[in-house]
Image (cartoon, coloured by chain):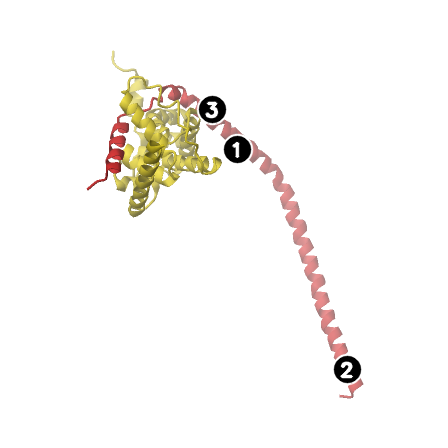
Chain colours: A red, B yellow
Amino acid sequence: MKHKEDENLDRLFAAARGFDPDTAAMENYFEKRLLATLRERRSARAAWLSWAWRLIPVFTALAVILGIASVLMEANRSQDIISAIIRGQENQLVISYLTGE
Amino acid sequence: MGKSPGIAKDNIRSDEHLVEEAKRGDDEAFSLLVTRHKHRIFRLGSRFARNAHELDDICQEVFIKAYEHLGKFRREAPFGHWLSRIAINVCYDALKKARHDRGNHLPMEDFPDNLCSSASEESDARHDAYETLMWGLARLRPDERIVITLLELEEKPVAEVAELTGWSEGNVRVRAHRARQALKKILEGHREA
């Protein structure tokens, strides 16, 4: 059994369904405004893309420089590792000599 | 005598045909699609917009999204149905944004205006009922409002509402039930006040 509030709500919906908001004035020239907006967006996107093309050489040069820098740093690090190993071995020799082993 | 070739040609071209032409950059084809479907989108948007300016924004956004995603349109469903899905998503986003902007508080006096009053031929009873309902619906959560509007005002079946929103049918039923309970409380509270 439906409550009174449910019945009231159902009656409200039934009455409201028959009402159609008048949007005719807003629909006038809607296509024109819409196409103008779309054209504006298209030209803004084209301008951004033309700027992006100009930045490609800059980013390429940056990538090359970073690549060279990382290779050089890697070489130095390898040399550091070798020196550390040699130092470690020398230390071991000194300790062995001093302790008489 | 009879229709001009231009008009006859437009009547023959299906939505799917116009979509293909619009994808190839034919603005006139897209414009024709807009003409065919704008009334339905405006009517749907008017259920959720707070004023005429917001309604225009919503409808523009719907068709802009449709234009930008024409490549995703599959002919599994009619173009109108695909467009309605986009419209529901745009309306839902607009409702969430409006709720966020006003901080979940809507003053008792705030009432959607302008959209209803211009239809002078509608009876006072239907007009008043619509105004009262819109006032109550504006106080629901966005998801509840979407569901109850589609089910009760647009009289769509649960399955179609589920398809339009992307929610499961169970989810739609739960939201509809919550929306009814909340709406009853809101309207009863206002009646007593």
Which is more toward the observer, B120 or A71?
B120
Q: Amino acid at mark 3?
A: Ala
Q: Are marks 2 and 3 in contact (CB under 8 Å)?
A: no
Question: Which residue is most to the left?
Answer: A1
Residue visible at 32% across and 46% down in the picture:
B171
- Residue under pointer 1: A45
- Residue under pointer 2: A95
Q: Amino acid at mark 1?
A: Arg
Q: Are marks 2 and 1 in contact (CB under 8 Å)?
A: no
Q: Amino acid at mark 2?
A: Ile
Say whether disc 2 or disc 1 marks the residue closer to the N-terminus. 1
Q: Along the horizontal axis of the image, is A11 left or right of B29?
A: left
Residue visible at 23% across and 35% down in the picture:
A7
* Measured Cα–Cα span from mark 3 to mark 1: 14 Å
| Numbered circle sitting on residue B74 | none
Q: Is residue B74 visible?
A: no
Q: Is residue B125 above or below residue B101?
A: above
Q: Chain of mark 3?
A: A
Is disc 1 on the same chain as disc 3? yes
Secondary structure at badge 2 equals helix
Q: For the residues carrying marks 2 and 1, which lies nearer the camera in this image?
A: 2
Q: Along the horizontal axis of the image, is A100 left or right of B20?
A: right
